[in-house]
Image: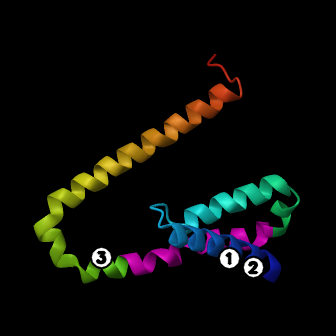
Amino acid sequence: MIKAAAILLSCQLVGTAVSRAFGLAVPGPVLGLLALLALLALRPGLAGRIAAPSHALLANMSLLFVPAGVGAIDHFDSFGSDGPALLTALVLSTILAILAGVGAFLLVARMIGHRDE
């Protein structure tokens, strides 16, 4: 379990180091996930070894949203002055994220040759 967690954290560390070293606009954890994806493609047996810590992280994902909630309460006065802009950004980004998901699903379905019936 410790080795598997070390693999996950190492991928995140590599992604963060690359992002900061080259001044990329892509967050380090995103690059780390891409590194993990490449690692899993090269060594498929690794997926079974990192499954347990991955499930443990996902099961406790709600704990990661506590700091965001505290930050929102700390800047509550900003909601009054910037509320309409924040609401517009939230609604538009949600719609765009859903459309991106649909587009990705349709692209993958087309790539694997799935046809509507």
Closer mark to the observer between disc 3 and disc 1:
1
So how many labels did they put on this image?
3
Disc 3 marks which residue?
Answer: 72
Q: Which residue, as the protein is rendered here, is positioned at the far top? A: 117
Looking at marks 2 and 3 on the same chain, the residue that comes earlier in the sequence is marked by 2
Q: Quadrant of the N terminus?
A: bottom right
Local crowd at mark 3 within 10 Å, few (<14), some, or many (≥20)?
few
Q: Secondary structure at mark 2?
A: helix
Q: Mark 3 belongs to which amino acid? A: Ala
The disc labelled 2 sits on which kind of residue? Ala
Q: Which residue is mark 1?
A: 9
Which contiguous range is marked in magenta? 50-68
The CA distance from mark 3 to mark 1 is: 27 Å
Identify which amino acid the numbered label 1 is placed on: Leu
Left or right of 42 in this view: 115: left
Q: Give the foreground label among 2 and 3.
A: 2
Q: CA distance from mark 2 to mark 3?
A: 32 Å
Q: Marks 2 and 1: CB-CB under 8 Å?
A: yes
Q: Position of residue 93 (x, y in %)?
A: 35, 50
